[in-house]
Image (cartoon, grey):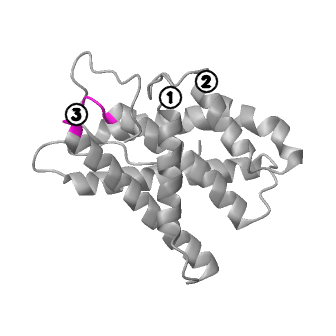
């Protein structure tokens, strides 16, 4: 994946605030999702409209935020974790809205709320899978691939799910893990999230 991200941060008490850390996570997720769209274009995927590109980006962002949530489990108290992930989701919604409005102008539509709605729906769906950031497993990757596939032209649908599962998602998850590990202290021994409630 041709993207360079800062993955080492100060994790001491005098370093970043929780809000700042959530913003860094959201920005990283957005860049990784955007890179997936760019890479699919390089593979001759027919992303003929900005709308299609944004839908793919949204699917990737929702998946990556959920996997980050699983990785954060055990690194901070649960109430703080919930606030942290919600803050990252809110920031992703703001980034999405800013990018869409840069393309279409101010049309009065609440793109932030729409994007956060997608994040919440996918979080509830991904919560049914048993997986971790380190070992996502075939079922959850397959589900992501199918979600992306729904937004593609028929000519690309036969191969894009495999491209997401085999190449794009694993590379993005690897970068995401480095970012989370750089932002937060390691989880307590034995703290491994297998399922979440979609909160």
Do the residues bearing badges 2 and 3 touch, measured as CB atoms within 8 Å? Answer: no
Q: Earlier in the sequence, mark 2 or mark 1?
A: 1
| Mark pair 3, 1: CA separation | 26 Å
Query: What residue occupies the far left of the structure in this picture?
Result: 14
Q: Which mark is residue 185?
A: 3
Between 167 and 65, the one lying in front of the other is 65
Do the residues bearing badges 2 and 1 touch, measured as CB atoms within 8 Å? Answer: no
How crowded pointer 3 is (Cα within 10 Å; few <14, some 14-19, many 20+) is rated as: some
Q: Which mark is residue 61?
A: none
Which secondary structure type mostly characterizes the magenta part of the structure? loop
Q: Earlier in the sequence, mark 3 or mark 1?
A: 1
Q: Residue shown at 70%/37% (left/top)?
A: 146
Q: Name the residue under label 2.
A: 139
Between 59 and 113, the one lying in front of the other is 113
Q: Quadrant of residue 93?
A: bottom left
Is residue 91 one of those drawn in magenta? no
Q: Residue shown at 53%/69% (left/top)?
A: 111
Q: Earlier in the sequence, mark 2 or mark 3?
A: 2
Q: Mark 1 points at which residue?
A: 128
| Mark pair 2, 1: CA separation | 10 Å
| Mark pair 2, 3: CA separation | 29 Å
- SS for tag 3? loop
Q: Position of residue 15 (x, y in %)?
A: 16, 50
Res. 3 in view: no
Q: Which residue range is magenta in the image?
A: 72-78
- From the image, which quarter does the C terminus lie in? top left
- From the image, which quarter does the N terminus lie in? top right
Q: Where is residue 188 in the image (x, y as percent from the top left)?
A: 21, 23
């Amino acid at each position: 994946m041709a993207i360079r991200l800062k993955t080492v941060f100060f994790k001491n008490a005098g370093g970043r605030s929780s809000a700042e850390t959530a913003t860094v996570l959201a920005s990283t997720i957005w860049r990784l999702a955007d890179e997936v769209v760019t890479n699919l274009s390089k593979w001759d995927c027919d992303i003929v409209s900005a709308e299609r590109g944004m839908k793919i980006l949204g699917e990737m962002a929702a998946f990556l935020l959920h996997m980050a949530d699983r990785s954060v489990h055990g690194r901070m108290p649960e109430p703080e974790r919930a606030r942290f992930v919600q803050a990252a989701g809110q920031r992703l919604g703001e980034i999405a809205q800013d990018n869409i409005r840069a393309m279409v102008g101010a049309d009065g539509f609440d793109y932030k709320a729409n994007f956060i709605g997608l994040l919440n729906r996918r979080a509830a769906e991904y919560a049914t899978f048993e997986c971790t950031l380190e070992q996502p497993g075939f079922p959850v990757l397959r589900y992501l691939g199918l979600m992306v596939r729904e937004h593609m032209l028929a000519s690309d649908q036969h191969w894009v799910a495999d491209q997401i599962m085999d190449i794009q998602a694993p590379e993005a998850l690897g970068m995401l893990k480095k970012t989370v590990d750089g932002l937060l202290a390691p989880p307590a021994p034995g703290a491994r999230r297998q399922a979440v409630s979609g909160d």
